[in-house]
Image: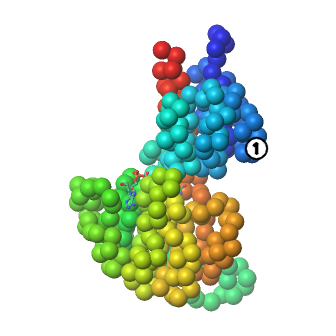
């Protein structure tokens, strides 16, 4: 019956499978993939659950107006855009889809790494402009890769890098010895990683307000000309310090899928985006047909489970 039917609001673009599973599960779904923040604030009070991606921020102000809200579902993995503590305080459950996008993010990471080493962005642009000239790159084979954040994505990047003939160092704040041994990586301190790596790939999980892992001090310690790849969160790096390090050549290349503001807003961020030794993709790590399907399924199932447990 429709009596007491739960209402779910989806605020960002998701695979249609997510809507289908929710509707088959008996909930009423409003799909508003480009809902503005103002509109969200004015209607969120009507809903039992919201489904968001990284674009939509669920902060104190949104939660304050969400009197009926029981579940926040993140169709993806990063919870840095959600005030999880405030949600917990209000007894609102938070669900997400860990692991569903791992392979897609790993593949994009490798793409960015190869692209940085071979200057692919510049090569494509030059060729299209009619300049058929060679650009000299570097090999990844035989180089040292430092993986910062050795979880699902970081450890898998390490195993692919091993297949390319890279030597991999792993740094994490938790004990990752077992998985590192399994994929043939050596666990080191952050300092050691910074000192030895030719390529640094960042895969840390960030919570709201976490400090940068690579700040000014850490960027001072890297190898001259290091390539840095980031498909996790921009906030893992001090952006202004990074821009400085790019200008001096201390950092040789920065290839990233994430920015501090998406889309970029601040002056230094736009300068960084336009730097000739920076390549940026628009947060497409999880944006594949396969990952979006898996995310849709995992998110919908987790959301329905929480709504049902609410009823009992
Ligand atoms: P995970 O939780 O499996 O791994 C994250 C690891 O980072 C954990 O082992 C954790 O201990 C470690 N970590 C946290 N803080 C650290 C710090 N200060 N220093 C060192 N290590 C630290 O997560 P995952 O699934 O591997 O995802 C990794 C990152 O990728 C997350 O930030 C996630 O938001 C991001 N991500 C991005 C996209 C995209 O579209 N670009 C898609 C999916 C995930």
Residue 145 rendering spot, x and y as whole percentages: 36, 72
> Looking at the image, is 36 positioned above or below residue 42?
below
Q: Nearer the viewer, residue 45 or 171?
A: 45
Please identify the quadrant where the N terminus is shown: top right
Q: Residues within 10 Å of mark 1 (few under 14, many from 20)?
A: few
Locate residue 283: give its quadrant. bottom right
> Looking at the image, is 74 positioned above or below residue 6?
below
Residue at image position (64%, 28%) is 67
For mark 1, give the secondary structure: helix
Can residue 20 be seen here? The reply is no
Locate residue 9: give its quadrant. top right
- Judged left or right of residue 202, residue 277 is right
Residue 83 rendering spot, x and y as whole percentages: 54, 44
Which residue position is annotated with label 1? 38
Residue at image position (51%, 82%) is 245
Residue at image position (38%, 60%) is 149
Decide if ligand 1 comes within 8 Å of the CB at mark 1: no
Residue at image position (57%, 78%) is 243
Q: How many marks?
A: 1
């Amino acid at each position: 019956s429709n009596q007491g039917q739960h209402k779910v609001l989806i605020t960002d673009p998701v695979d249609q499978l997510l809507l289908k599973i929710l509707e088959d599960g008996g909930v009423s779904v409003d799909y508003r993939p480009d809902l503005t923040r103002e509109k969200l604030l004015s209607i969120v009070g009507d809903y039992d659950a919201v489904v968001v991606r990284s674009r939509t921020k669920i902060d104190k102000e949104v939660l304050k107006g969400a009197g009926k809200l029981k579940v926040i579902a993140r169709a993806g993995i990063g919870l840095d855009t959600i005030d999880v503590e405030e949600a917990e305080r209000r007894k609102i459950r938070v669900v997400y889809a860990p692991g569903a996008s791992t392979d897609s993010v790993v593949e994009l990471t490798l793409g960015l790494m190869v692209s940085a080493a071979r200057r692919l962005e510049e090569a494509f642009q030059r060729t299209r402009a009619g300049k058929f000239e060679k650009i000299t790159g570097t090999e990844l084979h035989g180089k040292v890769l430092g993986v910062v954040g050795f979880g699902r994505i970081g450890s898998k990047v390490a195993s692919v890098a091993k297949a390319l003939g890279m030597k991999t160092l792993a740094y994490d704040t938790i004990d990752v010895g077992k998985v590192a041994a399994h994929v043939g990586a050596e666990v080191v301190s952050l300092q050691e990683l910074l000192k030895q790596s030719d390529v640094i790939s960042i895969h840390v999980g960030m919570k709201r307000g976490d400090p940068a892992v690579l700040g000014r001090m850490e960027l001072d310690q890297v190898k001259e000309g290091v390539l840095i790849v980031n498909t996790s969160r921009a906030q893992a790096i001090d952006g202004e310090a990074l821009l400085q390090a790019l200008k001096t050549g201390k950092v040789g290349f920065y290839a990233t899928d994430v920015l501090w503001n998406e889309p970029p807003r601040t002056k230094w961020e736009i300068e960084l985006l336009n730097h000739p030794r920076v390549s940026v993709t628009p947060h497409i790590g999880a944006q594949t047909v396969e990952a979006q399907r898996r995310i849709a399924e995992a998110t919908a199932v987790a959301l329905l489970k929480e709504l049902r447990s609410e009823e009992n």
